[in-house]
Image (spheres, helix red, strand yellow):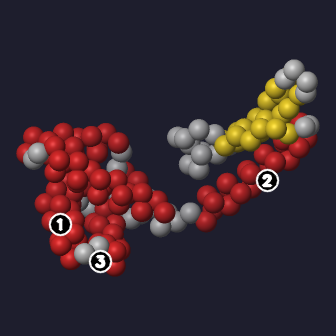
């Protein structure tokens, strides 16, 4: 975790900016930044408060490292049963059982890397049309984002 304060001089006044980076919360995205403080102390106080908020999120976060991909698929399909039509649900189930489950199997979610997803897309592109591969990618993307929310 890093906290920085930056001074910015303008024509008529000086302002301070607080920059907070917390591993696994703000990264790999940009760090959290808030500008416009009149004094350095105000910027540091804000940064410390945000730091505590981010650390609280880390402590409350569930351990996704232990969840297998198969379990995520089952929970995701339960969610889809509530929100999708029968035809749409059967289409998603088919894409998962034919493509996603055989490739990712019982791997832990934490072990799935962007390279693995690129390999999956390359493999499926050899077998299927671009549109079908795109549909599978959209489902995989939504499923992984939903896992992060859960």
Task: Name the image quarter holding residue 52.
Answer: bottom right
Mark 1 highlights which residue? 91
Q: Is residue 141 visible?
A: yes
Mark 3 highlights which residue? 81
Residue 123 higher or lower than 57, as above or below: above
Q: Position of residue 27 (x, y in %)?
A: 56, 42
Give the label on residue 49, or none: 2
Of labels 2 and 3, earlier in sequence is: 2
The residues tagged by marks 2 and 1 sit, at their Cα atoms, a distance apart of: 46 Å
**Left or right for 136, reference 26:** left
Which element is circle 3 on? helix
The residues tagged by marks 2 and 3 sit, at their Cα atoms, a distance apart of: 40 Å
The residues tagged by marks 1 and 3 sit, at their Cα atoms, a distance apart of: 12 Å
Residue at position x 84%, y 23% from top?
10
Q: Position of residue 110 (x, y in %)?
A: 41, 54
Q: In this rendering, which labeled residue sits more in front, label 2 or label 1? A: 1
Classify mark 3: residues with Cα within 10 Å, few (<14), some (14-19) or many (20+): few
**Left or right for 11, reference 28:** right
Q: In this orientation, which residue lies closer to the viewer: 32 or 72?
A: 32
* Residue at the left extreme, as displayed: 127
Of labels 2 and 1, earlier in sequence is: 2
**Left or right for 48, reference 115:** right
Which element is circle 2 on? helix
Task: Name the image quarter holding residue 68.
Answer: bottom left
Which element is circle 1 on? helix
**Left or right for 102, reference 25:** left
């Amino acid at each position: 975790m890093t906290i920085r304060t930056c001074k910015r001089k303008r024509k008529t006044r000086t302002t301070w900016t607080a920059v907070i980076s917390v591993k696994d919360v703000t990264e790999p995205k940009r760090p959290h930044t808030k500008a416009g403080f009149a004094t350095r102390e105000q910027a540091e106080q804000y940064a410390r408060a945000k730091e505590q908020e981010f650390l609280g999120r880390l402590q409350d976060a569930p351990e996704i490292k232990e969840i297998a991909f198969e379990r995520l698929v089952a929970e995701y399909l339960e969610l889809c049963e509530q929100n999708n039509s029968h035809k749409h649900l059967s289409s998603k189930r088919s894409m998962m059982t034919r493509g996603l489950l055989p490739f990712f199997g019982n791997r832990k979610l934490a072990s799935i890397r962007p390279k693995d997803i690129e390999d999956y897309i390359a493999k499926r592109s050899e077998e299927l049309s671009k549109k079908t591969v795109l549909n599978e990618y959209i489902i995989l993307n939504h499923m992984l984002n939903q896992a992060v929310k859960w």
